[in-house]
Image: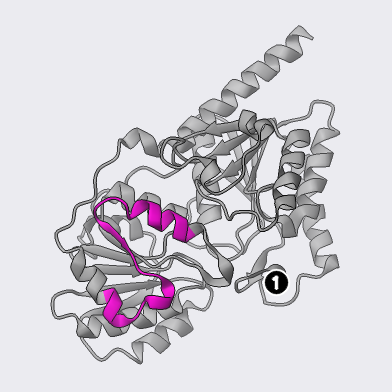
Amino acid sequence: MRVMILVTHLLGTGHLSRALTLGRAFGGAGHDAHVVSGGVPVENLSAKGITLHQLPPVKSDGINFTTLLTEQGGIADADYLADRKAALLSCLEQIEPDVIITELYPFGRRVLKGEFQALLNRAQEAVDPPLVFSSIRDILAPPSKPEKALETEAVAAVYYDGVLVHSDAKLTPLEASWPVGAMLADKLQYTGYVAPPAAGEHPDGTGSGEVLVTAGGGSVGQNLFEAAVKAAALDTENHWRLLVGGADKARVIAELQSRVKCSNVTIEPTRPDFRQMLTGARIAVCMCGYNTAMDLLQSRTPAVFVPFDAGGEVEQTLRAESLAKQTGFTVVRAADATPEALLEAVQSLAGAEVQPLDPKQFEGATQAVEIVEQFFEKHIGQEQSA
């Protein structure tokens, strides 16, 4: 199969990371995997076994997801978006996919509805239209209005063969964050969690026994980092390591280092060996995006979650509260994340153990490939019998 995965990350990097993991699974199964990325290029993410196509990139204006900016920070105007749409349709023509997977759409990314709909319409007009799937995480941002849920169902009914839900239906059904009608329920295909293989220990022990603070790969989390620096100054037992991401990480790191008044703090950019460092960390202090949650569950590292909730976002809070029902995890709301609160939460997890999960629960990418293969085989059989 030729598989085309379309993804646009606007603030953090989790959407792209998950799409690449899915793409690597298709490539590893012998398929011709293409990921078309519409967000800003990201360092340290592997595209091994994938053909990566880059559209003219856009990003959000901070937490304002209705205003799109170019990589340089200018407004992505109508001409710029028209160029993106043309580039996307060119990718479709070049790849000639048997399968299209749209990451998050139509459940989100409505600000880019024009280019998604152009792609879906053009694909539907093909002599042999590709199968179309949506790829969504365990918890979505609930629709702000009932009309948005109805519009999503209408698009799914017309264009989509299935919806790949990267979750465990018994632990986190889609209904926990999104209304599911009968038509949509028939399209849901639960894959389990999408995560790369467990990282294992760091070869040189970097980060071992430390408090590891991260806000992911995007340009968020400065308040968390500032509180962590002050918390470290109050901590007489642990070394704290802050990993700072985003396009402005050099500025943020310089500002944070100017405030360090103790010797038990290391501040550096995000690293490609983060997952190995996490395995040996004593405790993580982090947000609660999908990929971070998977890393923690795999590594069984205790964590203090400070979920991203700016702009009314609730996805990370719902996920953090769900995970905190088991031992080894606790939640501090962003508004309450003072240095003293962070340190108290870290100290409360001393000696805590995270319950192991069956490794098969993290094979969502492999299961997604198998699901799509089954749909494709059935599709081919129907064509041959027609």
Asked whether the viewer can see residue 87, the reply is no
User: Start and end of the magenta stretch?
Assistant: 316-342
According to the picture, the residue beneath numbered tag 1 turns out to be 69
**Residue 138: horizontal and vertical position, in percent?**
50, 46
**Residue 334: horizontal and vertical position, in percent?**
42, 73
**Residue 341: horizontal and vertical position, in percent?**
29, 77
| Residue drawn 64% across the image and 35% down it | 3
Quarter of the view holding residue 227:
bottom left
Question: Total marks drawn?
Answer: 1
**Residues packed near mark 1 inside 10 Å, few (<14), some (14 to 19) or many (20 plus):** many
Q: Is residue 94 magenta?
A: no
Instruction: Quadrant for the C terminus, please.
Output: top right
Quarter of the view holding residue 175:
top right
277 left or right of 52 in image: left
| Residue drawn 46% across the image and 35% down it | 169
260 left or right of 125 in image: left
Q: Is residue 339 magenta?
A: yes
| Residue drawn 24% across the image and 65% down it | 207
Instruction: Quadrant for the N terminus, please.
Output: top right
Q: Nearer the viewer, residue 86 or 187?
A: 187
Element under disc 1: strand
Position above or below: 199 against 269: above
Position above or below: 206 against 334: above
| Residue drawn 50% across the image and 29% down it | 29
Quarter of the view holding residue 328:
bottom left
Type of residue at label 1?
A: Leu
Q: Nearer the viewer, residue 313 or 175?
A: 175
**Residue 272: horizontal and vertical position, in percent?**
39, 60
